[in-house]
Image (cartoon, rainbow, N blue to C red):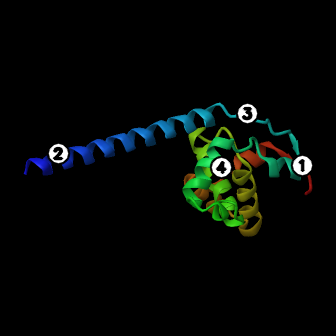
Amino acid sequence: MHMDSNLIEENDLTDLEENDCIEKVALILRKTILNINKFKLKSKIKAEDLINGECSIPEKLELFYKVLIGGQDIRRRDGVSCDRLTNSVASDAIFCINNGTVKPFKHITLGLTIKSLTNTRKVINTLNRFGHCCTITLWKNLKLKKL
């Protein structure tokens, strides 16, 4: 019986160490995101401004999501699907952590695309509440040139 209690304690210790590592990584990525360089969108915006967004994805954040999504398989990590998903979730993390004040390319272009396809604000507002795109008021404040 005494050996079982030691085993439980060792497992608990391992769990605590893993949780501590996860917390440290999360705080490192949060700090990286909060220190991100934001590019101000011009008042007369062009298509390439929309594609670039207000920031680029930091290397640490990109690496984290590539490993999280792709695992240890380098071929999977370097794949198009993993790259697309990495950019998507990394953009969501940037947008959410900065409370929508920094808008990655996804949050600008997704909203514009959905608005042009559906011509409704409801879908945009719903996507915004889930942290996937910026609100429609952003586009009202910008003078969009014909793309």
Q: Point out which mark residue 46 bears.
A: 1
Q: Residue at x 76, y 41 (%)?
A: 54
| Foreground: disc 4 or disc 2 | 2
Front one among 76 and 35: 76
- Looking at the image, which is closer to me, 124 or 4? 4
Q: Which mark is residue 37?
A: 3
Q: Nearer the viewer, mark 1 or mark 3?
A: 3
- N-terminal of the two: label 3 or label 4? 3
Q: CA distance from mark 1 to mark 3?
A: 20 Å
Q: What residue occupies the far front of the structure in this picture?
A: 3
Picture disc at residue 91 = 4
Callout in the foreground (1, 2): 2
Q: Quadrant of residue 72?
A: bottom right
Badge 3 crowding class, 10 Å Cα cut-off, few under 14, some 14 to 19, many 20 or more, is some
Q: Is residue 44 above or below residue 32?
A: below
Residue at the spot of label 2: 6
Give the side of residue 69 with respect to residue 17, left or right.
right
Q: Residue at x 67, y 64 (%)?
A: 75
- Spot the residue most to the left: 1
What residue type is disc 3 on? Answer: Asn
Query: 122 left or right of 21?
Result: right
Amino acid at dot 2: Asn
